[in-house]
Amino acid sequence: MAQCTPLILRIVASSVSVAGQAGKIIRDVMKKGELGIIDKGVNDLQTEADRSAQNFIISTLTKQFPGVTIIGEEEPSCYEALDNVTADSDTSVLQATCPPDLVSVSEKDVVIWVDPLDGTSEYTKGLLDHVTVLIGIAVGQRAIAGVIHQPFHNFKLCDENKIGRTIWGLQGYGVAGFKPIPPPPNKRIITTTRSHFTPEIQETLDAMCPDELLRVGGAGHKVILLMEGKAHAYVFASPGCKRWDTCAPEAVLRAMGGELTDMHGATYDYSKDTPHANTRGVLATALASDHEFYLKMVPQKIRELLI
Ligand SMILES: Nc1ncnc2c1ncn2[C@@H]1O[C@H](COP(=O)(O)O)[C@@H](OP(=O)(O)O)[C@H]1O
Ligand SMILES: [Mg+2]
Ligand SMILES: [Mg+2]
Ligand SMILES: [Mg+2]
């Protein structure tokens, strides 16, 4: 790969390739049927697919970008250096025009947030469309690029070449791998958690009076619903999500013209020493111009709880 290609494009190109390969690891574990489920806490599952996919992603990216900080969801005990990893890059990303303000980013400025399998609870239940691989790229505090790979997209086609899709986005460039569709006007469709529902989420949704509620798994999958025009807002008035859940979705959504913030309207910090928990909840909208409208409907009591 030409070293004159800006670092940020080389990282996105490698992340696109690595996310696709991690998706195959996730499908292979499901095919084998030995999921190796562990509960890391309360309603917080990890499977062999989470472990193997993270190991592969971090091994590969560390080898290519040794000066970049990489933070993954699963514990470092799951990470073993792999000697035989291939260091491919997606050529279409390398051909993209780099936004001028990102041309001279260096490795020490970058943090990569890895969620090797988002939607683990749904994966264990066979709700395979809800699963994504998330690789988010931050420069300083800001999420500026992201890759969302959906390994079981078109799974029913049974043709290995047509299974899975990868969407990537870069601030100042836009999104690729997907043609965003605007949500229907004059409607209020909200997507929220399927497996981590709480009374506070219910109270927030009651205040927002949605025409339709889509309860699905995964932060990545919910942002895909926003991009597909199937929902207007993703509302998670709870502290359970982490930075690896939101870094890639936030960057991709913003590159498309949407927005993702906490429930107070502030952006999360993705620098390397930041806390991991998104304690102030998550609010995402397909159209950034709608964001304020949804923020205003968050009950004061819920705002005070999410600090
Ligand atoms: N209370 C909680 N405890 C642990 N993880 C939580 C959580 N609430 C949300 N999450 C994590 O946030 C992501 C999106 O959640 P949800 O599908 O409920 O909207 C999932 O990521 P993972 O599947 O990668 O762990 C989920 O585990
Ligand atoms: Mg998890
Ligand atoms: Mg996740
Ligand atoms: Mg995960």
Image: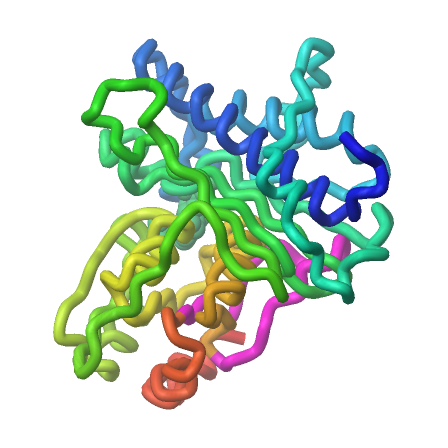
Judge by depth and name the residue closer to the eye, 198 or 160: 160
Residue at 32% across / 27% down in the picture? 163
Residue 197: image x %, image y %? 28, 58
Question: Which residue is painted at 32% across and 26% down in the image?
Answer: 162
x then y, percent, for residue 135: 57, 43
Compared to 225, does 237 lie above or below? Answer: below
Inspect this view and state whether residue 148 appears. Answer: yes
Q: Is residue 287 left or right of residue 110?
A: left
Colour setting = rainbow
Furthest residue to the left? 211
The image quadrant where one finds the C terminus is bottom right
Q: Is residue 224 magenta?
A: no
Q: Is residue 108 left or right of residue 305?
A: right
Name the quadrant containing residue 90: top right
Tell me where the magenta segment starts and ends, as one range: 264-284
Question: Is residue 37 depicted above or below 206 in this figure?
Answer: above
Residue 236 pos. (x, y %): 37, 65
- Quarter of the image where the N terminus is located: top right
Q: What residue is shown at x 44% (from left), y 78% (from top)?
A: 288
Nearer-the-camera pick, 211 or 155: 155
Side of 233 where 247 appears, left or right: right
